[in-house]
Structure formats: structure tokens, C-alpha cells
Image (cartoon, rainbow, N blue to C red):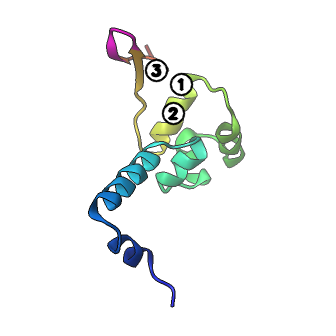
């Protein structure tokens, strides 16, 4: 008889379960592309299109683009219910947060 995922995890040592859970959390934190972001936000292309004031085919195009204006990316993220933050790491300077990048009204 096949075992469930919960049964398999329960049979593992505690430290291994902790490593698996930590890696799963890392993987969830890494979203590959705008389509994945939209799906994670539980939004349809039509809902994003409505929030952006465009038609659904424009959302398909945005999701497939590999090079976007920051303003387009910010609007897409906000339409999905999120906020965009730009983070820069410089050697010896630590982490810097860029503000005002991609704002439509400076």
C-alpha cells in the first residue's frame, strides 16, 4: 500500500524534516517569472488586466517579456496585490533599498 507524504515525512529524523522544510521555504520564496507570481497571488490574467486597465492578451505579453520597464513591473506586482522593492547589495556597503525606481509620478 502506498504511503502519504505526511507518513513519509513523519518517518524521517527530525533534523532531516527541518532541512526539507527550510529548503521548501527557500523554493517558495523564489518565484520564477510574472506568471508564477500571478498564480501565487491567486489572480487570473483577466483580473490583472482589469487592474492594469488593459485587455487580457496584454497580460500574456507582459508575462512573457524578459525585459520590462520598472514601471510596468511595479504596476503588475501591485495589480497582483503586492509591492515592489528593489534591493541592491554592494561589497562593503551592505544592503541598500532603492526607492522611487519605476514610479510613474516622481
Mark carried by residue 103: 3
In the image, 59 versus 54, the foreground residue is 59
Residue ID at (31%, 65%): 13
Residue 52, position as x, y percentages in the image: 56, 39
Is residue 38 covered in magenta?
no
Residue ID at (40%, 17%): 89
Placement of 10 over or under 23, stated as above or below: below
Instruction: Using the numbered discs, state the Cα–Cα distance from disc 3 to disc 1 in whole angstroms.
Output: 6 Å
State yes or no: discs 1 and 2 in contact (Cβ < 8 Å). yes
In the image, 23 versus 80, the foreground residue is 23
Which region shows up in magenta? Answer: 90-96
Task: Assign a secondary structure to mark 1.
Answer: helix
In the image, 69 versus 4, the foreground residue is 4
Placement of 100 over or under 57, stated as above or below: above
Task: Assign a secondary structure to mark 3.
Answer: loop
Q: How crowded is mark 2: few (under 14 residues within 10 Å), some or many (20 or more)?
A: many
Q: How crowded is mark 1: few (under 14 residues within 10 Å), some or many (20 or more)?
A: some
- Kindly give the residue lying farthest to the front in the view shown: 13
Placement of 56 over or under 85, stated as above or below: below
Q: Residues within 10 Å of mark 3 (few under 14, many from 20)?
A: few
| Quadrant in the picture for residue 97 | top left
Position of residue 18 in the picture relative to residue 64 (left or right): left
- Point out the image quarter for the C terminus: top left
Provide the residue designation for mark 2. Answer: 75
Residue 51, position as x, y percentages in the image: 52, 44
Residue ID at (35%, 53%): 19
Mark carried by residue 25: none
Position of residue 41 in the picture relative to residue 48 (left or right): left
Sequence-wise, the earlier of marks 2 and 3 is: 2
- Kindly give the residue lying farthest to the bottom in the view shown: 1
State yes or no: discs 3 and 1 in contact (Cβ < 8 Å). yes
Provide the residue designation for mark 1. Answer: 71
Amino acid at each position: 500500500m502506498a504511503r502519504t507524504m505526511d507518513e513519509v515525512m513523519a518517518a524521517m529524523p527530525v533534523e532531516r524534516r527541518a532541512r526539507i522544510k527550510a529548503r521548501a521555504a527557500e523554493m517558495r520564496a523564489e518565484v520564477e517569472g510574472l506568471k508564477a507570481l500571478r498564480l501565487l497571488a491567486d489572480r487570473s490574467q483577466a483580473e490583472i488586466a482589469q487592474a492594469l486597465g488593459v485587455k487580457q492578451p496584454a497580460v500574456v505579453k507582459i508575462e512573457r517579456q524578459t525585459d520590462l520597464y520598472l514601471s510596468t513591473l511595479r504596476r503588475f506586482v501591485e495589480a497582483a496585490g503586492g509591492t515592489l522593492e528593489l534591493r541592491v547589495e554592494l561589497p562593503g556597503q551592505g544592503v541598500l533599498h532603492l526607492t522611487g525606481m519605476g514610479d510613474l509620478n516622481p
